[in-house]
Amino acid sequence: MPRKRVQWEKDGIARLAELGSPRFLGTGFGDGQARLSGEVELGAVFDMPPTSTLNEITEVLTRVAALGSKMASDVRRPR
């Protein structure tokens, strides 16, 4: 996972952890890459048990897709 360099990124990751968010939230390429490319680049790591059913995996991906849609519609800079 890319290392977070600016404080607001580090604070955001800490807030996600405090809220009990899944580990894969906050995996991205950060402020430095966004400034270079002019775009936010996100990645995700899905750590599912090998016993997961397709239904369970679909539920996780559906929740992540909904969250991604909300994030994409909010044009404010993260705080």
Image (tube, grey):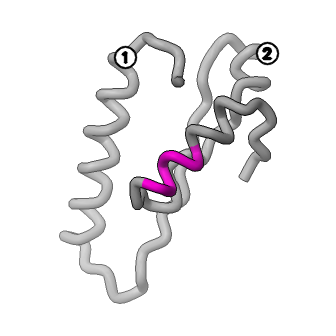
Q: Is residue 56 above or below residue 73?
A: below
Q: Front-most of 19 and 34?
A: 19
Mark 2 vs 1: CB contact within 8 A: no
Amino acid tagged 2: Leu
Q: Quadrant of residue 34?
A: top right
Q: Is residue 66 above or below residue 46?
A: above
Magenta residues span 13-18
Spatial CA span between label 2 and label 1: 21 Å
Instruction: State the residue at coordinates (67%, 11%).
Output: 38
Q: Position of residue 45 (x, y in %)?
A: 54, 58
Tell me if 19 is positioned left or right of 8 in this view. Answer: left
Instruction: State the residue at coordinates (23%, 71%).
Output: 56
Instruction: State the residue at coordinates (47%, 56%).
Output: 18
Instruction: State the residue at coordinates (38%, 27%).
Output: 71
Disc 1 secondary structure class: loop
How many marks the image carries: the answer is: 2
Tell me if 37 is positioned left or right of 73 in this view. Answer: right
Q: Badge 2, how many Cα within 10 Å: few under 14, some, many 20+?
A: few
Instruction: Check residue 3 in the rendering and tell me which mark sits there, or answer none.
Output: none
Q: Magenta stretch: dominant SS?
A: helix
The residue singled out by tag 2 in the image is 36
Disc 2 secondary structure class: helix
Q: Position of residue 35 (x, y in %)?
A: 74, 14
- Dot 2 or dot 1: first in sequence order is 2
Q: Quadrant of residue 22?
A: bottom left
The residue singled out by tag 1 in the image is 74
Q: Position of residue 64 (x, y in %)?
A: 34, 47
